[in-house]
């Protein structure tokens, strides 16, 4: 052989060594050219015995298409892999980059819309040698916002065992993986919320945090997530979906921002800090506290004009008439009435927050969803009606002509208790925020709401010019008092109707029986010719104890009534699945939430919703009508209301085809819905 050929042969031999030392390119299954989510299997470099080899499934979606994270969310399908490896080789769990959220037709998806890689660690045994054949069969789902196509491919490569060059793309792919936190996280699971405490230094910036949970069906993916800083802990509060019974551990990814930064956490059951400063999107979405306080004050003021308050205006009117007797008496009654209203609002708010923290799915006005409360209110309304009508007189009873601070305070308590179930303008935003704020800020909002509700009466007590506008006290007040028994009696009838709607005819009859027993006891007590206070007080105590026994017995006999009768609109009962299906049909959807005890809701239904004109406009435009009935407690409706920043009803949403829901005003006009349907 000529000496000049030796350099050529050496170069050729070196080239062959490089070819066989590098991993062979992946092979796609037949027909892979038609894949909307093209994939290749890549090795980082040659395998080394006793070490870990990293493989990558590199995906390149077509424009407009996307793939899914391991937990796809409300819809979609996670990737499935079947490995064929040499003996002794073991494939580990796939490692995904941080996904992002994609909301389609009310369903939340966890997706990748651009090029991405899923890394898989493979354990190489000590005795590995030669060329290792690796093959994987993958199944995944490729989707757009309109269609989904199941795809599969068999990918293979041959990896040499030894040393050699590594693929530089793995640096970028590995950097996209969220690192696992060194310290374990902790979680608490209630019926309504999953609370996770992630150890994250306070110095770490959070632009748009979001938790992607590995466990499926444990949380509501669409519902807003609330984040709070508590020292070096980040506490995430995630609304439950209610489908999973529990969990021994919780793993997932905490996204830190929209640039793909995040961390992987693993949580075990443990104590989760409470309180802290709100951070993230939910905090940014809330208005400043001073603005929320202003909304609560305005909402309380306007609540005096809402139909929710009309049944108790008789009590207010009687108190206003008495307020003109003297300046000092007017001020005393104004303060007492205000104290009663504020105390009732704060007490209801505190009970609401405590029950929600304990896992109950309830919202504002929860008191009228309780059968026992309805029975107690019916008893009270019946007793007040009889007292105003003059059937009996009890000097110690709050609503007699004696008046005074006790009467005004009791009037305030009842006014707030009965008036607050519905939400009016300005009030909805404040009460919805109260469910997300720290407890002391939430209670402050409830107190300001009560102050707004009581403010007109308080001003009458302290502004002589306003008080001079009232009629002078006189005998007319006794006649006026008897007249006011009529609206109070209508209130009692409305409560009896509500009892029927809640539990049927048997429950309503039992509630009426309790009210009659209470009225008989009070009338007998008032007319007893006793001269000593002790027998009278003993009888009153005995009657109260009897009622305390009768009310829970009656409530215990409660059984939900039959299905509601159809209105003018043939509305579909609300569920999140039904809403998603209706929106997926690409038709306009009108969704309203109501309750039998919400007079504002009933007025809106009579004025704007349950009308032949609305029905005709909806049929012409193909509008799907959907109704959420919150008369009785419904956890799914409560979660939906909370997710939309509403603490109670009414709530009206209009979904134009392909668009997110538009929140409509809480007071509808006759043309509100017909105009919306006409534009569809």
Image (tube, grey):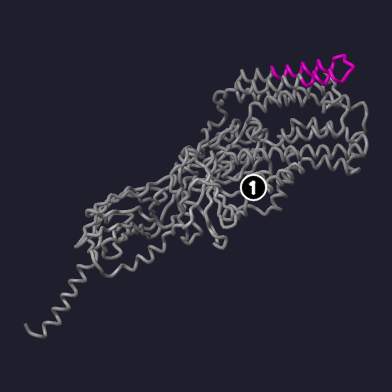
Answer yes or no: is residue 630 visible: yes
Task: State which region is magenta.
Answer: 513-541
**Does the segment drawn in magenta span residue 222?**
no
Toward the viewer: 24 or 472? 24
In the drawing, does residue 434 fall left or right of residue 408?
A: left
The percent position of residue 253, horizontal first and vertical second, equals 46, 54
The percent position of residue 668, horizontal first and vertical second, equals 65, 40
Judging from the image, what secondary structure is the residue with disc 1 in? helix
- Seen in the picture, residue 667 relative to 208 is either above or below; the reply is above
- Quickly name the residue at label 1: 433
- The residue depicted at 80 percent of the width and 39 percent of the height is 339
> Quarter of the image holding residue 492?
top right
**Does the segment drawn in magenta span residue 532?**
yes
Toward the viewer: 594 or 138? 138
- Seen in the picture, residue 314 relative to 201 is either above or below; the reply is above
Quarter of the picture containing the N terminus is bottom left
């Amino acid at each position: 052989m000529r000496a000049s050929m030796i350099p050529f042969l050496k170069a050729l031999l070196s080239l062959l060594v490089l070819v066989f030392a590098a991993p062979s390119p992946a092979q796609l299954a037949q027909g892979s050219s038609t894949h909307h989510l093209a994939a290749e299997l890549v090795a980082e470099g040659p395998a080394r015995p006793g070490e870990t080899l990293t493989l990558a499934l590199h995906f390149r979606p077509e424009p407009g298409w996307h793939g899914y994270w391991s937990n796809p969310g409300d819809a979609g399908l996670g990737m499935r892999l079947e490995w064929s490896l040499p003996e002794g080789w073991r494939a580990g769990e796939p490692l995904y980059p941080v996904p992002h959220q994609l909301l389609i037709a009310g369903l939340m998806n966890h997706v990748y819309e651009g090029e991405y890689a899923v890394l898989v660690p493979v354990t190489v045994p000590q005795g590995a040698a030669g060329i290792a054949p690796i093959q994987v069969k993958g199944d995944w789902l490729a989707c757009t916002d309109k269609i989904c196509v199941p795809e599969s491919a068999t990918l293979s490569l041959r990896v040499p065992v030894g040393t050699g060059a590594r693929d530089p793309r793995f640096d970028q792919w590995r950097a996209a993986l969220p690192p696992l936190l060194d310290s374990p996280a902790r979680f608490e699971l209630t019926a309504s919320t999953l609370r996770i405490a992630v150890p994250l230094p306070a110095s770490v910036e959070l632009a748009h945090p979001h938790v992607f949970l590995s466990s499926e069906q444990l949380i509501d993916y669409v519902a807003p997530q609330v984040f709070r800083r508590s020292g070096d802990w980040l506490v995430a509060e995630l609304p439950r979906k209610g489908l999973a019974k529990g969990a021994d551990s919780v793993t997932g990814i905490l996204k830190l921002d929209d640039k793909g930064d995040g961390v992987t956490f693993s949580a075990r059951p443990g104590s989760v800090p409470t309180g802290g400063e709100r951070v993230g999107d939910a905090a940014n979405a809330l208005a400043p506290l001073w603005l929320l306080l202003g909304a609560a004050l305005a909402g309380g003021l306007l609540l005096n004009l809402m139909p929710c308050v009309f049944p108790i205006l008789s009590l207010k009117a009687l108190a206003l008439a008495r307020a003109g007797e003297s300046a000092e008496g007017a001020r005393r009654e104004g303060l007492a009435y205000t104290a009663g209203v504020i105390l009732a609002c704060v007490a209801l708010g505190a009970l609401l927050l405590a029950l929600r923290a304990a896992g109950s799915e309830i919202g504002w006005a929860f008191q009228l969803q309780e059968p026992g409360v309805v029975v107690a209110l019916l008893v009270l309304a019946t007793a007040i009606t009889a007292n105003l009508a003059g059937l009996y007189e009890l000097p110690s009873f709050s609503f007699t002509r004696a008046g005074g601070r006790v009467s005004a305070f009791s009037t305030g308590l009842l006014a707030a208790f009965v008036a607050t179930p519905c939400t009016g303008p300005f009030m909805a935003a404040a009460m919805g925020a109260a469910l997300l704020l720290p407890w002391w800020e939430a209670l402050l909002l409830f107190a300001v709401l009560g102050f707004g509700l009581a403010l007109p009466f308080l001003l009458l007590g302290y502004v002589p010019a306003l008080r001079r506008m009232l009629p002078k006290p006189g005998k007319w007040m006794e006649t006026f008092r008897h007249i006011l028994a009529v609206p109070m009696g209508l209130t009692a009838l409305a409560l009896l109707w509500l009892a029927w709607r809640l539990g049927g005819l048997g429950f309503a009859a039992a509630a009426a029986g309790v009210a009659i027993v209470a009225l008989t006891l009070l009338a007998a007590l008032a007319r007893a010719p006793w001269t000593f206070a002790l027998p009278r007080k003993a009888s009153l105590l005995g009657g109260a104890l009897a009622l305390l026994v009768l009310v829970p017995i009656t409530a215990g006999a409660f059984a939900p009534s039959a299905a509601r009768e159809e209105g003018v609109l043939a509305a579909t009962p609300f569920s999140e699945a039904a809403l998603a299906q209706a929106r997926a049909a690409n038709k306009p959807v009108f969704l309203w939430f109501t309750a039998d005890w919400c007079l504002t809701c009933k007025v809106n239904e009579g004025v704007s919703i349950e009308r032949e004109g609305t029905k005709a406009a909806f049929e012409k435009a193909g509008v799907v009508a959907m109704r959420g009935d919150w008369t009785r407690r419904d956890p799914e409706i409560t979660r939906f209301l909370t997710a939309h920043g509403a603490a109670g009803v009414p709530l009206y949403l209009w979904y134009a085809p392909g668009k997110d829901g538009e929140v409509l005003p809480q007071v509808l006009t006759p043309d509100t819905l017909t105009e919306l349907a006409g534009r569809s």
